[in-house]
Image (tube, grey):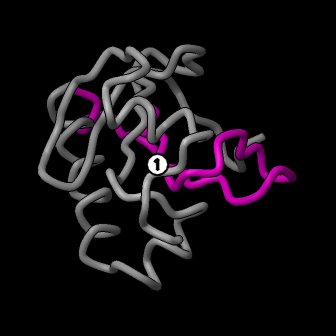
Amino acid sequence: MAGEPQSDCLFCKIVSGDVPATIVRESDTTVAFRDINPQAPTHVLVIPKVHYPDAASLAAAEPQIAADVLREAGTVATEDMVDGHGYRVVFNTGAGAGQTVFHAHAHVLGGRGLQWPPG
């Protein structure tokens, strides 16, 4: 059922504490942690505590929690001091776009030049 933890989901296991992660922030509705394969000096994932397969389904079902993810992404950028130079918030949707964990999540990337368009 959408929104419910999934036993086979890596990010649900991070939310529950069953899988360790380097958590940098936690709110009532989100968890933010360092990516294990960073693509920039700042590379933090911000996830909702509820399970939805992608950002669009999260936003459709629980728009306030989608907004919480975006707010926390901005706070992560400020705390990592990349907000002054610029940072990127990326939602990959689908395997063809590089999504490997099908639990909605935002990548916060910064701390180096970020080319456009992204590769």
What residue appears at the point 25 percent right and 38 percent down from the top-left corner?
Answer: 83
Instruction: Decide whether residue 92 is among the magenta residues.
Output: yes
Q: Residue at x 30, y 47 (%)?
A: 73
Viewer-side residue, 1 vs 79: 1
Name the side, left or right, on which 26 lies relative to 93: left
Q: Name the residue rendered at 35%, 53% in the picture.
A: 48
Q: Residue at x 40, y 30 (%)?
A: 14
Residue 24 place in picture, x, y as percent: 22, 24
Q: Residue furthest right?
A: 96
Residues 22 and 1: in front is 1
Q: Is residue 100 magenta?
A: yes
Number of numbered tags placed on the structure image: 1
User: Dominant secondary structure of the magenta stretch?
Assistant: loop
117 or 65: nearer the eye?
A: 65
Q: Is residue 40 left or right of residue 32?
A: right
Image quadrant in which the C terminus is located? top right
The amino acid pointed to by label 1 is Ala
Picture layout, residue 30 above or below residue 82: below
Mark 1, residues whose alpha carbon is within 10 Å: few (<14), some, or many (≥20)? many
Q: Which residue in the structure is indicated by mark 1? A: 106
Left or right: 114 in relation to 93: left
* Above or below, 69 relative to 118: below
In the rendering, at what x and y percent does residue 34 appear?
Answer: 39, 21
Q: Give the range drawn in magenta.
A: 81-109
